[in-house]
Image: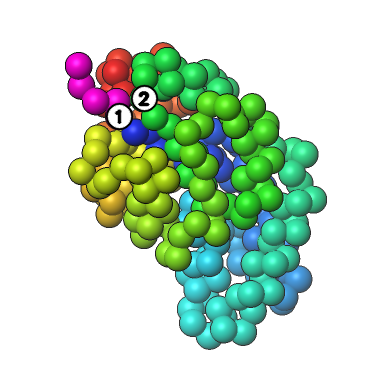
């Protein structure tokens, strides 16, 4: 029989419905520092590492001037909205379906550890996941491959082992490509199908539950 595949799953926006809260938190954090950036533009950045958002908004000068404080305030605004975050339809079913097929599973989030803890508890996934990552585990965040590489190392695996990334944004797909992994996506990130395909997604599904029902069409068959 084939060796089990390693499934590396993004958490925010893929398993829990949190992308819009994160975008609004960035807007509020920046506005409190006298920087107005349209929320739709901030939403387009959700999925890349939070350490890269300010530079993407305003370059090195803005990052140097307000980056650390903006990230602190953004995290606090997420704290205020944390009770509004819920699992996406079928998210836990997807985790169970992956494990039922004998695969190993890593929840690879680049979020702040306290927010990752909330999401994992919402999914009741501590006994399902073989490993969990947060922003503290990688030096470079998505679209760099570091977080996915850390996920493999936590299982004692190598880049040559069969693995697949499941995410919701072009940043997830690009990180997977940089790590040499195929990527499957759900639409909860708000990116268009064409964008996700152009980034390299091999499959696109409406919800985690839809993906769970279609696993036999994927490398996780």
Residue 54, image x, y percentages: 55, 71
> Left of 187 or right of it: where is 175?
left
Residue 210 in view here? no
Give the quarter of the figure containing the C terminus. Answer: top left
Instruction: Give whichever of discs 2 and 1 has the lower sequence position.
Output: 1
> Left of 192 or right of it: where is 49?
right
What SS does tag 1 mark?
loop
> Left of 14 or right of it: where is 185?
left
Question: What's drawn in magenta, residue-wise?
Answer: 1-5
Residue 18, image x, y percentages: 62, 42
Query: Residue at image x 72%, y 76%?
Result: 34
Q: Badge 1, how many Cα within 10 Å: few under 14, some, many 20+?
A: some
Give the quarter of the figure containing the N terminus. Answer: top left
Of residues 108 and 80, the one drawn nearer to the viewer in this rendering? 108
Q: Does the magenta stretch include residue 4?
A: yes
Residue 105 in view here? yes
Q: Quadrant of residue 214?
A: top left
Magenta stretch, overall SS:
loop
What residue would you read off at disc 1? 5
What residue would you read off at disc 2? 103
Disc 2, disc 1: CB below 8 Å? yes
Q: In which quarter of the image is residue 39?
A: bottom right
Q: Does the magenta stretch include residue 218?
A: no
Residue 172, image x, y percentages: 40, 47
């Amino acid at each position: 029989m084939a060796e089990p595949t390693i499934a590396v799953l993004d958490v925010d926006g893929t398993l829990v419905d949190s992308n819009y809260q994160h975008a609004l938190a960035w807007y509020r954090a920046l506005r409190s520092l006298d920087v107005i950036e349209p929320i739709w533009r901030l939403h387009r950045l959700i999925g890349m590492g939070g350490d890269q958002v300010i530079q993407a908004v305003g370059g090195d000068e803005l990052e140097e001037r307000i980056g650390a404080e903006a990230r602190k305030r953004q995290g606090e605004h997420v704290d205020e909205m944390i009770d509004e975050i819920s699992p996406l339809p079928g998210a836990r079913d997807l985790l169970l379906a992956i494990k039922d097929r004998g695969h190993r599973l890593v929840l690879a989030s680049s979020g702040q550890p306290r927010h990752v803890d909330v999401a994992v508890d919402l999914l009741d996934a501590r006994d399902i996941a073989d490993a969990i990552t947060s922003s503290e585990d990688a030096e470079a965040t998505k679209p760099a491959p570091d977080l996915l590489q850390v996920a493999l190392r936590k299982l004692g695996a190598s880049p040559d082992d069969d693995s697949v990334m499941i995410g919701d944004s072009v940043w997830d797909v690009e990180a997977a490509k940089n790590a040499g992994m195929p990527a499957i996506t759900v639409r909860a990130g708000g990116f268009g199908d064409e964008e996700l395909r152009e980034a390299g997604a091999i499959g696109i599904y409406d919800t985690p539950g839809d993906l769970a029902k279609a696993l036999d069409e994927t490398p996780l068959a």
